[in-house]
Each structure stands twice: as C-alpha cells, then as structure tokens.
Image: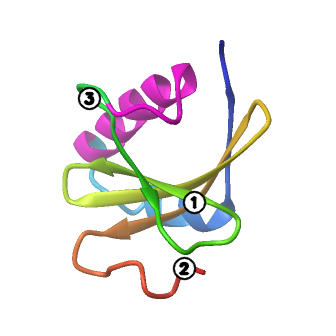
Amino acid sequence: MKYKVFISRTFQKKFYQLQKSIQNLIRKTLKELEKDPYTSRPNCDIKLLRDTRPKKHRLRVSNYRIIYVVEDKEIKIIDLLKREVGYSRLE
C-alpha cells in the first residue's frame, strides 16, 4: 500500500537551508516512508510520539527529526527539528 506525502512550508524552509548531502539523505528516507509510515526498519527509524493530538510520529535522519501525521493514505510532514531541540513544543 502506497501513501502520498505532503510537505509543509515550515519543513521546506528548513530543508532547503541544509547541505545537499543531508537533503539527499532526507529525500531517500521520505521515499521509504511512503511504503509504510508506521513500522521502523533499516533506513527508516520511526517512533510514535506520546501525548500528542493528533498522533504524531518522528522519523530520525542523522541529527535531524522529521515530525509527521498520518491521515488515511496521506502523510503530512509538519516539521524538521535538529536533534538537540526536543519535542516539548509539539502538542
């Protein structure tokens, strides 16, 4: 089953400020995410974030965390965080 990925402007702004090598790594990982946004596997480290409404997931890519929500067959990429930032502002 294939999911469709939608990217927020917040994510886009942060994404294009990164080095090309990191951008390519993130693109590759997002392609993997289309296959299954729930299950962690090699090249796709996924965790469910607790106490968030709606339920959010995080995808780990190097020192960055991609925050997303799954609705039906759509994956909505919300934010791109540096590892040091943390998830306290997500609700």
Tag 1 near tag 2, CB within 8 Å: yes
* Residue of label 1: 56
Screen quadrant of the N terminus: top right
Q: What x and y, as percent, mark residue 80?
A: 45, 63
Q: Is residue 71 above or below residue 90?
A: above
Picture residue at 30% right of the left edge, 50% below the top: 60
- Which of these two is toward me, 52 or 27? 52
Which tag, 1 or 3, sits closer to the chain's start?
Answer: 3
Q: Earlier in the sequence, mark 1 or mark 2?
A: 1
For residue 43, which numbered disc appears in the image? 3
Q: Of helix, strand and loop, which mostly describes the magenta segment?
A: helix
Task: Judge depth for marks 1 and 3 and give the one in front.
Answer: 1
SS at circle 1:
strand
Along the viewing direction, whichever of 60 and 9 lies nearer the viewer: 60
Outermost residue to the top: 1
- Say which quarter of the image contains residue 58: bottom left
The residue labelled by disc 2 is 90
Query: Do we see residue 16 in this rendering?
Result: no
Residue 26 spot, x, y in % from top left: 37, 40
Q: Is residue 64 visible?
A: yes
Tags 2 and 3 touching, CB below 8 Å = no
Q: Between residue 18 and residue 11, name the one nearer to us.
A: 11
Q: Is residue 33 magenta?
A: yes
Q: Which amino acid type is shown beneath numbered disc 3?
A: Asn
**Extreme residue in the front direction:** 51
**Rendering coords of residue 22 (x, y %):** 27, 46
The furthest residue to the bottom = 89
